[in-house]
Amino acid sequence: MIDILDFNNMLFMIPIAAIVALLFALYFFRNIWSRDKGTPEMQKISNAIETGAMAYLRRQYKTIGIISIILAVVLALAGLVESFEAYLGYKVAIAFLIGAGFSILSGYIGMKISVNANIRTASAARLSLNDAFVCSFRGGAISGIAVSALSLVGLFAVVLVYDAWIGETMTQTLHAVVGYAFGASFAALFAQLGGGIYTKAADVGADLVGKVEAGIPEDDPRNPAVIADLVGDNVGDCAGRGADIFESTAAEIIGSMVIGTAVITAAGGMNLSNNWVFLPLVLMAFGLIASLVGIFVVRMKNEDSDVNKSLNNGYYLTIALVLVFLAISTYFMLGKECELWYYYFGTGVVGIILGLAIVYITQYYTGNHKPVKGIAKSSETGPATNVIEGISIGLESTVLPVICIVAAIIISYTLGFYAAPEGMDRMAFGLYGTAIGTIAMLASSAFILAEDTFGPITDNAGGIAEMSNQPEEVRRRTDKLDSAGNTTKALTKGYAMASAALAAFLLFAAFFEIVAEIQGKTLSEVFNVNIGDPLIFCGALVGAVLVFYFASLAIRAVGKAAGEMIEEVRRQFREDPGIMAGTSEPSYSDCVDIATRGALRAMVVPALLPILVPVVFGLIYRFLFPNVAYMAVGALIMVGTIVGILMANFLNNGGGAWDNAKKYIEEGNHGGKRSPAHAAAVVGDTVGDPFKDTAGPSIHVLVKLLSTICLVTAVLFVVVPA
């Protein structure tokens, strides 16, 4: 039984962190909800946004719920097969449903907070920039705190219950708990993909017809797609990202815990404690507390203050506290059993440095620096050169992140490898080093999600201010916050990509650990994928093409839904000239319905691909080539992960660069708004929209879902010894 009051395992920090997080969340909630909601005109627009977002989520969650129940039944029935009963069955199915349910709840919390903070931010902007900033960031903070606390406490509660329920080894407990990670990843992929299709279908339609053809501003109330566009910011960047961050932390903590059991097994007669398993949970608890402090100190001194600098100051404080807590937890939990415990502190430092490096690289490629200015310059010669330059920048942007990821994996693995006592299976200890690096990077996830949700809140606030005809000074303040929000959204995607890279590595290591346990071997004996073997090479090829096909379906779904949106906006302009004259109101609800139907219709097939492809492929190999089946599936996961990381980086950075090149021109460069360069940049931004907000973020979830589904179903691909 797990003793949460044992000082040696420090698990008492989890309920402490949860209580402190709840108090902070309640304080921020009361602070925001007590603020003024603005004029009746502002509230009318805000209510329309909330109604559209809630209607979409209800329909999306109904779809996810039905498919989740079907999958849970399949998992439960699979446990009736005698050779599968120790690894599948109703216990895994229940954990799957809990993980999916909590992931959905995380997305709902993120969206609900956003659609209520946006109106209060717009109203606060009538008073001062600082009031609007504090309101929007604390709104994002509630979401970040709630999602991170739910991820940590929910997982810990499931581990406690399953440990008492199963009553065997921690390894057996985690075999059932991996269902939780699968459920979280499964629901997150639907939420991120569906939300991404919705938001970009609306955005593309609003931009191409409103800004290019009609020549009206982005948030002009005459544009029929404008409410759908504002709704999309919430269901994509808030609900989708909330579920994404939830599954990231849940899946990566579970993967790290599985590697912890591999360390204990590798140590043999040393009788290591379960502290190696619990350390990731404790690190995330400390990280939540560090994030709370960082969030609380974020302030702006005056109207001329740099918004990004204020946010960065809070982030740097969070990182500093994470480093202190990392040293404390590794010393107290590993120091008595590992003389070189500080090597694992070093792996955590490597993970944190990687996160910072990726953030700065992303900022370089998507901020107002040479790449973005180059795309803006190319817009002077038309849309074609804009698109060509944007694609080349996106491709180039994969180089530096890969160098950083390679360095981080090598260093963290090497530190963990040499921390192992003499005579031990060093591979497990090395992989544990990469796991601690990943968890240390994720420890600040509450602050990161606060920054991410801050983006759509400020975007919505700007739209509400413009549509309700607020004074120019108010719009100037919301524009300043919106510009910072665009940067934070780009940075958090880079952060998510970096965490996905390290996390996927530890997750497929966890897959091989489960294979080793099934076969009664050590991790080093089974963690050997010979890609030169033609049969295994085929698995690698399937993993690579899966990412390409998934991206294709996601981007095409946006194109199809956006085409319907464009036709609807054109129809309304054509049939009702009073819309452009300002004498009649467009039908916003028709556009909201088109985006909703397009997203729900298009999200199912691509979301099921990463579940069906590895399972079907693995089962075919199980019957045709049983001795190499698990290795071929391992190759599928590995190469799918590699290609997915590169593809996500290309799509995210390329799309972000196109977006900011358009904004750079709108600031008055290269002819400014309504110039030929601006029209070309809008086309480039439109191409980049499904890249950065639909396919790219969804691939982050895809690569982790590939690993979690294979973690759950590993027994299907392994010949169990008689």
Image (spheres, helix red, strand yellow):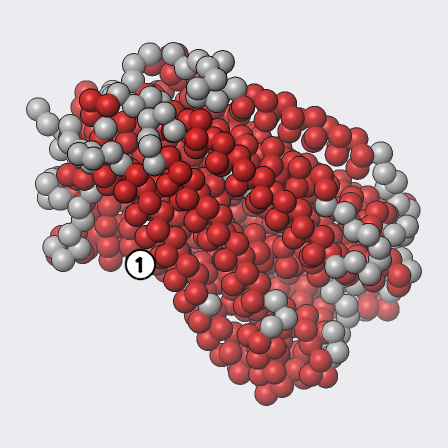
Residue at the far front: name it.
339
Rendered image quadrant of residue 470 = bottom right
Q: Is residue 90 left or right of residue 355?
A: left
Tell me, yes or no, if residue 535 can be seen here.
yes
Above-or-below relation of 481 to 103? below
Q: Residue at x 34, y 36 (%)?
A: 340
- Quarter of the image with the N terminus in it: top left
Rendered image quadrant of residue 77 = top left
Q: Residue at x 67, y 46 (%)?
A: 314
Q: Residue at x 84, y 66 (%)?
A: 578
* Helix, strand or loop under label 1: helix
Judging depth in this view, the residue of 480 and 241 nearest the camera is: 480
Residue at the far bottom: name it.
381
Q: Disc 1 designates what residue?
A: 545
Q: Position of residue 436 (x, y in %)?
A: 40, 39
Label 1: few (<14), some (14–19) or many (≥20) C-alpha neighbours in 10 Å: some
